[in-house]
Amino acid sequence: MRLNVLWIVIIIATALIHATWLDAVRVEGVLPDLILLLVVYFAIAFDEERAMYTGVIGGLFQDVASTTSIGHNVLCYVLVAYATGRIANRLVTENPAVKTGLVLCAALIHGLLHSALFYVAQPQLASIGDIIGRIVPTAFYTAIATPIIFFMLDKIFQSELKPIQNRIA
Amino acid sequence: MLGARAIVRGVRSYRPSITLGVIVALCLISMASGTRASLLGDAVRKVVSVAASPFLLTMNVAQDAVEYTTGAVVSYNAATRDAADLRDELNRTRLDLSRAATLERENDRLRNLLKFVRGNPRLKTMSASILQRSKGMLTIDVGSLHGVELSMCAITKDGIVGIVTRVEPTMSYVASLHHAACSIEARTGSDRVLGIVRGSGNDVNQICQVQYIDLKDHVSKGDEVVSAGGNVYPAELPIGKVLRVQKQGDLLRAAVVQPYANPYTIEELLLVQVALPKPSAMASRPEVDHRFAMPDDRPLQERFAP
């Protein structure tokens, strides 16, 4: 119960921060994707199901905040969450470099999915070069922010993660 | 029973995949139907906007605070420049305000003069500004080139100011009621007693006297003194008010008069060029030329002696 409440609060707070305060760290129009970081974190630390629900809530927030149809961001995050959760089961995810690499891959896949869906939904507005030109920088920026965000999330979910780790051990 | 359990166990083992399928299906349906402005979307937007507003407000406050703090250092030179510019602008504005106030006062004075001129059609006047004043003698900015002549009567809307005693080409001198050289034939009291108004001749005692009043004539405090008229002054122009009556030798009395027009505060005056008598006076007199016979070469004392 405590885990779920904490999880919901973290997602909502992150979504709000993403929509409001994150502009302060904007570099050349590029922002780190905090929701994606949460999705990957929960996929690694818990399971793909929690990561998918994280993607649903976070994506819903982004859909509402942006001009896209409801489901656009949700679909991207959910697919990335599922894939990441599956892959994370087969990786040694304790290594920070692996986590960062996983986030980089997840961000690239998410960006591509997002662009593809956007292109399908609104081909008259989508400029592929412009969209793809933003995917790679965003992925790198998100990957750079990974150690800090994951460290903070580890601290927040420390007490919740111990039973899981003990059970695995 | 066993079949149901097997189904539940199968669903549990494939729960993530089933969840993914359900969510993807819902997303695709939502996107296909274009539920951008649906009821759900509006509701969620409202919730998000309400929930996000404290964050936005906090961020604005934080941004303002940071800009305010860093601005003192980062834009110190600009702030100093701005302050200097604002100081200059303030000084200019103060100057403009002062000018505007002066113009407004001047406008009021001129408006009053104009009103006075329009209210006295029997007087043909010429306006003049006072350049200098000293011991009751006023220097004005018009002279013989402008048509000024000796002994012209200087007036304001309040009453008589004095008489022109010297004329230069571009300026003239007016001996005011405070100047010793000024003598005006005047009437006062209920009996309309005739007398001569003379100035005290100093700046401290800014009053004048109606002299040569006979002991038997009735003059009292508060009586108005007006010009008697003649070839120099138009008649019935106000001069001042009697403050008190005192003895002047054994046979005569003098009335101390406070003039209405203060030569030390006025800035413009009118010089009377032509003064027609009142219609009532004209009806009882033969027609004469009422233009002043100027210049009069007689000395002042001789001209204005009773």
Image: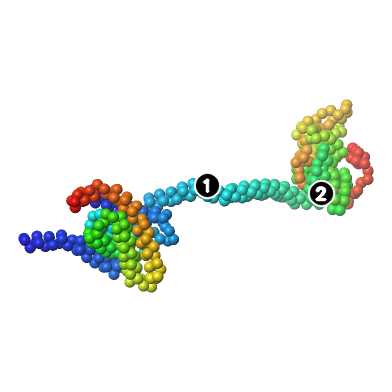
Q: Is residue B202 left or right of residue B110?
A: right
Tell me the SS state at disc 2.
Answer: loop
Q: Nearer the viewer, residue B282 or A76?
A: A76
Q: Quadrant of residue B250?
A: top right
Residue at point 35% right, 58% down?
Answer: A143
**Extreme left residue here?**
B1
Residue B141: numbered disc: 2
| Residue at mark 2: chain | B
Measured from the top left, where is residue B10 in percent x and y?
13, 62
Residue at point 34% right, 52% down?
Answer: A148
Residue at point 91% right, 39% down?
Answer: B301
Sequence order check: which comes first, mark 1 or mark 2?
Answer: 1
Q: Is residue B303 left or right of residue A77?
A: right
Q: Nearer the viewer, residue A139 or B57?
A: A139
Tag 1 residue: B72
Judged by depth in the image, the label closer to the viewer, 1 or 2, is 1
Have a look at marks 1 and 2 and say if they share a chain. Answer: yes
In the rendered view, tell whether residue A25 sits above or below residue B215: below
Measured from the top left, where is residue B221 in percent x and y?
76, 32
Measured from the top left, where is residue B264 in percent x and y?
77, 40
Q: Nearer the viewer, residue B14 or B244?
A: B14
Q: Is residue B70 visible?
A: yes
In the rendered view, tell whether residue B129 sits above or below residue B244: below
Tell me the kind of residue under disc 2: Asp
In the rendered view, tell whether residue B276 sits above or below residue B11: above
Q: Quadrant of residue A52?
A: bottom left
Q: Is residue A11 left or right of residue A166?
A: right
Tell me the kind of residue under disc 1: Ala
Q: Quadrant of residue A17?
A: bottom left
